[in-house]
Amino acid sequence: MNKPIVLSGIRSTGHLHLGNYYGALRNFVDMQNDYDCRYFIADYHSLTTQPDPSVLNPNVRSILAEYLAAGMDPDKCIVYVQSDVPETCEFYTLLNMHAYLGELEKTVSFKDKARKQPNNVNAGLLTYPVLMAADILQHKANFVPVGKDQLQHLEMARNFANRFNHFYKTDFMVEPKPYEAKGEPIKIPGLDGSGKMGKSEGNCIYINDEDAVVIKKFKKAVTDMTPTEPNSEMNEPIKNLFYFLKLVSAPEVYDQFLAAWNDCSIRYGDLKMQIAEDVLKVTRPIRERYNEIYANADYLNKVREQGAEKARAIVRKNVEEMRQLMGFRKF
């Protein structure tokens, strides 16, 4: 019996941080055994906002090494670089013929990016949802793990698939559904006292941060005055630190600091150092594997070529079927 297909893109900019690790990546690793998983590093997408050739290749190499170090297994899933599958561009071009200007201009991401980069409102930015849909539909993916900010794009992919099938009287396109992870989603807070961890907020602990950097970041984490009354309610910055503590530390350690909070004897310096040390127990082995993998260009190229070969075989077949349906045939 064929396993359901799960498709997800990986941003090719920035570095992997704890929010990614405990969010999407842990799901990716867990899904490898139960689904036909296909993951790609979205370097085409990065050109809409960061068209710098000097950083494109190093970013892709770094991201691939980080995800492999954190548990993504190329023998259990297909992991490839988007630009290594040129058939994606043809699928994207053909799908564009069934995407309308009005709906693309209304997307939240387009309006947001156009506002932030008024001097670079390029066609790729406008048709970003079509390329994202092509990434998904070319694999006939059943499920796509998406955050709330990408739900509109997934719905557009479903609309494009339905529109194509209706127009050509076929069931070629599979309408993807959002993948719902088991259990409560983990949202890692930032170290600035509010909100979630994110690179644009500058409040991240990165997987490849050195020990001294992690400790320094936690030392600077926002707190407030220590409690003066027993069993006081925590404000958001303190709740965030205790959330970290519960995530990475042993239950007895969490209970010890919670008791210290409740009897007003807590020392924030001790709390931050405990969290930093326990975070490093998680990140240090990944960072060490990352350094080994990143330095091994032969291995990275092997993984990249293996993924590209598998992905191209799948997409090539589907693009050819799409061409036939649209009338591109020999005389």
Image (cartoon, rainbow, N blue to C red):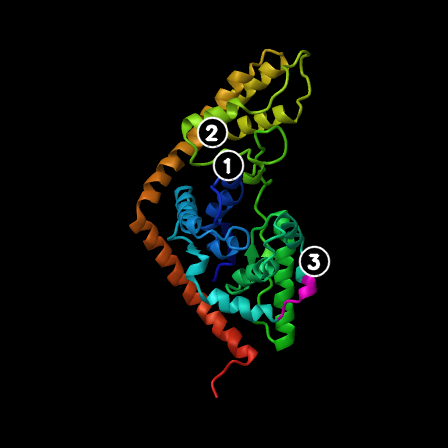
Establish if 49 lies above or below 260: below
Sequence-first tag of 2 and 3: 3
Is residue 100 a member of the stretch shown in magenta?
Answer: yes
Position of 19 with respect to 78 (left or right) is: right
CB within 8 Å, label 3 to label 1: no
Judge by depth and name the residue closer to the eye, 248 or 193. 193
Label 3: how many Cα within 10 Å (few below 14, some 14–19, many 20+): few
Q: Which mark is residue 106?
A: 3
- For the residues marked 2 and 1, what is the alpha-carbon distance in whole angstroms? 9 Å
Q: Earlier in the sequence, mark 3 or mark 1?
A: 1
Q: Position of residue 42 (x, y in %)?
A: 49, 54
- The picture places residue 257, in percent across and down from the top left corner, at 56, 18
What's under tag 3, amino acid-wise?
Answer: Lys
User: Mark 2 to mark 3: distance in Å?
Assistant: 41 Å
Work out whether 266 lies above or below 315: above
> Label 1, on which residue?
18
- Give the percent coordinates (x, y) of residue 307: 39, 57
Image quadrant of residue 213?
top left
Is 287 situated left or right of 120 in this image? left
Of marks 3 and 1, the one in the foreground: 3
On the image, which quarter does residue 152 sit in?
A: bottom right
Residue 207, magenta (yes or no): no
Along the viewing direction, whichever of 54 and 141 lies nearer the viewer: 54
| Residue drawn at point x = 50 percent, y = 24 percent | 275
Q: Are marks 2 and 1 in contact (CB under 8 Å)?
A: yes
Q: Amino acid at mark 2?
A: Val
Residue position marked by numbered label 2 in the rendering:
279
Q: On the rendered structure, is 98 left or right of 273?
A: right
Q: Which residues are magenta?
A: 98-103
